[in-house]
Image: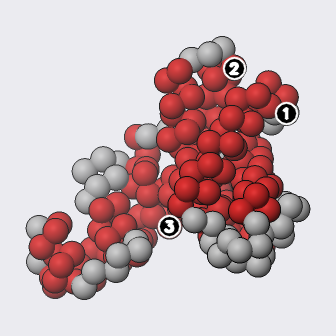
Amino acid sequence: MREAHTTPDPQSQDPALVEACLKGDRRAWASLIDRYGRLVYSVPSRRGLPPEACEDVFQDVFAILLKELPRLRDAASLPKWLITTAVRESARAARRAGPTASVLPDVQAQPPPEEELAAAEERQRIREALDLLGDPCRALLVALFGPEKPDYSTIARRLDMPVGSIGPTRARCLAKLAAIVRSRESA
């Protein structure tokens, strides 16, 4: 099993990643999109935009980032910038869709309220911590708390583990995840 401390903190890598992107490194761009793609896509999705509009917002946000990256003052603020831009682009997509679109009414052009921004940043921190956690803990927690929510028997079959060990393993994995999140917050 991969130890949590062997993988560098993704947030601490952002300045180097941004610098590589600015130099035209395609692998850096792919890494940046891989790191923050779920975060960007989640914004229009949570606002009820249809999948094709979510994909358009995703593409628009990263196209804007490509253009605006040289002006980004602080690489550590990249997640916040991406969220704010995704909110604005979601509002534009909702306006383009017109009044007949089945979009939730909370789509607005302003940046999200502080609570929403904090929640989005927390989700991103947890995603990154899950990546650092490694398998089998990551696989178990995703199975337990992901969108599918299968029963313990299904999880046990998928992960090839006894049903009776899921609860204790979940507790240990959650403790490891919490320790990773705490260590990253104090860094």
**Pointer 2 and pointer 3: residues touching (CB < 8 Å)?**
no
Quadrant assignment, res 88: bottom right
Q: Which residue is rendered at x = 53% and y = 43% of the image?
A: 35
Using residue 142 as the reference point, say whether residue 85 is left or right of it. right
Where is residue 162? Give x, y as percent: 11, 77
**According to the image, label 3 marks what residue?**
178
Q: Which residue is rendered at x = 72% and y = 48% of the image?
A: 82
Where is residue 172? Give x, y as percent: 34, 72
10 Å crowding of disc 1: few (<14), some (14-19), many (20+): few
10 Å crowding of disc 2: few (<14), some (14-19), many (20+): some
Q: Which residue is rendered at x = 79% and y = 24% of the image?
A: 70
Front residue of 154/43: it is 43
**According to the image, label 2 marks what residue?**
22
Q: Secondary structure at mark 2?
A: helix
Where is residue 165? Give x, y as percent: 18, 79
- Specify the label residue 99 is tagged with: none
**According to the image, label 1 marks what residue?**
73
Q: Determine whether 58 is above or below 130 in the image.
A: above
Q: Nearer the viewer, mark 2 or mark 1?
A: 2
Amino acid at dot 3: Ala
Quadrant assignment, res 181: bottom right
Label 2, label 3: how far apart the Cα atoms are = 34 Å
Q: Secondary structure at mark 1?
A: loop
Quadrant assignment, res 142: bottom left
Which residue extends farthest top?
23
